[in-house]
Image: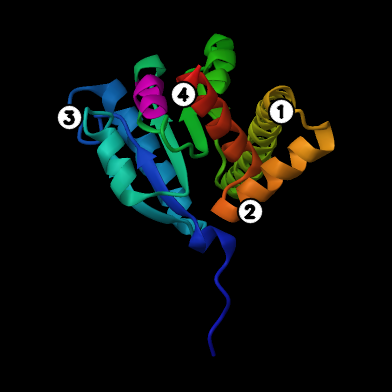
Amino acid sequence: MTGKSTPSQQLRIVVIAPDTLHPDSDDTEAIELAERSRLLRITLLENGYNVIAVLPTDTFLDERIAQLQPDLIVVDAESGARDTLEHVVMATRDERRPIVLFTNDDDTTHVKDAVAAGVTAYIVAGLAPERIRPILEVAMARFQHEESLRRELADARSELQDRKVIDRAKGLLMQRRGLTEPQAYELLRKSAMDRGLKLGEIAQRMLDAADLLG
């Protein structure tokens, strides 16, 4: 009998961890950070998440993320996580992904900046294993909602820009060919259909040609 895969099993996660995963034996703070990081990864695995890699914040981070194509990035940041955050945000600037940051730094003054930079969820110390699933599910849902709003805004801006270009092209045809507005629109529509282009594209081409010819 085969069971269905749960959403957590399908979710491919990259963990960005500090460089203290193998600390010196006499560095108490580094040992504590390494243990916290280890427990976080164990908790992810125990909840059925597919942790495909654990990466450091180095100059190759963007290339590695691009190669791995994770669904979500978990940042395990020590105190003073600004440098780590900057690395991760820069590494995902071309292809946005949900970013969940776990930190032991209880200074919440950076939360606003982190969220503005692209962090989907900012979780301060005290993570209980039973919280990991709802935290990641909410982070994914929030990211998807924000991306949907972002696409709708981009589409609305594109539509407004197309409308302006089409109106300018209609005005040009009306002026130079003595057409009415419906006739000018129909000529644009037919030209677009004949060439397999969008109305805004044919209108922009007409305006570009008019600028060249003077």
Amino acid type, mark 2: Met
Query: Along the polypeptide, which appears first: circle 2 or circle 3?
Result: 3
| Residue 171 figure quarter | top right
Q: Is residue 108 above or below residue 160?
A: above
CB under 8 Å between callouts 1 and 3? Answer: no
Amino acid type, mark 4: Asn
How far apart, in angstroms, are the residues tagged by discs 2 and 4? 59 Å
- Secondary element at tag 1: helix
Label 2 sits on residue:
193
Front position among marks 1 and 4: 1
Amino acid type, mark 3: Ser
Within-10-Å neighbours for mark 4: few <14, some 14–19, many 20+: some
Label 3 sits on residue:
25
Check residue 160 in the rendering and tell me which mark sits there, or answer none.
1
Name the one closer to the observer, 122 or 171: 171
Label 4 sits on residue:
104
Q: Which residues are magenta?
A: 84-90
- Secondary element at tag 4: loop
Front position among marks 1 and 3: 1
How far apart, in angstroms, are the residues tagged by discs 2 and 3? 72 Å
